[in-house]
Image (tube, rainbow, N blue to C red):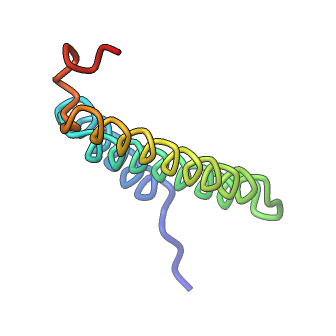
Amino acid sequence: MNEIPLHLVLFVSTTLFFTGAYGFLTRRNMITMLMAIELMLNSVNINFLAFNKYLFPGKAEGVFFTIFIITIAAAEASVAIAIIINLYRKFRTIDAENTDSLKF
């Protein structure tokens, strides 16, 4: 069975991370910004799994960190969506550029 080289996995992970960072910094919609953060967290998960496989093949610390990050990301997404829904109900917009109208 052929293994994927570590540098290719890191290239994919880096590409995903910077795509997420670009999406977070350039988009104004809060939902799109949330998806960009999730993309960055998934690239970190790929890094944990890749380094676990190539540096410590008999151990499962990378897998545990990945499961922990997935759990935190799910909780973060649910809280963020609840906040976004409340902001939309109050201000009728989820545009992050509207900071003047978001003052409570």
Residue 15 x/y as whole percent: 31, 47
Residue occupying the far bottom of the picture: 1
Q: Quadrant of residue 33?
A: top left
6 to 92, vertically: above or below = below
Q: Quadrant of residue 19?
A: top left
Residue at position x 67%, y 61% in the image: 53
In the image, 80 versus 22, the foreground residue is: 80
Q: Dividing the image into 4 quarters, which one contains the N terminus?
A: bottom right
Residue at position x 18%, y 36% in the image: 27
25 to 5, vertically: above or below = above
In the image, 59 versus 3, the foreground residue is: 59
In the rendered view, does 101 fall on the left or right side of 69? left
In the rendered view, does 44 fall on the left or right side of 11? right
Residue occupying the far front of the picture: 90
In the rendered view, does 16 fall on the left or right side of 92? right
Residue at position x 20%, y 19% in the image: 101
In the rendered view, does 35 fall on the left or right side of 65? left
Q: Dividing the image into 4 quarters, which one contains the C terminus?
A: top left
Residue 9 x/y as whole percent: 45, 58
Q: Quadrant of residue 26?
A: top left
Residue 87 x/y as whole percent: 32, 35
In the image, 65 versus 87, the foreground residue is: 87
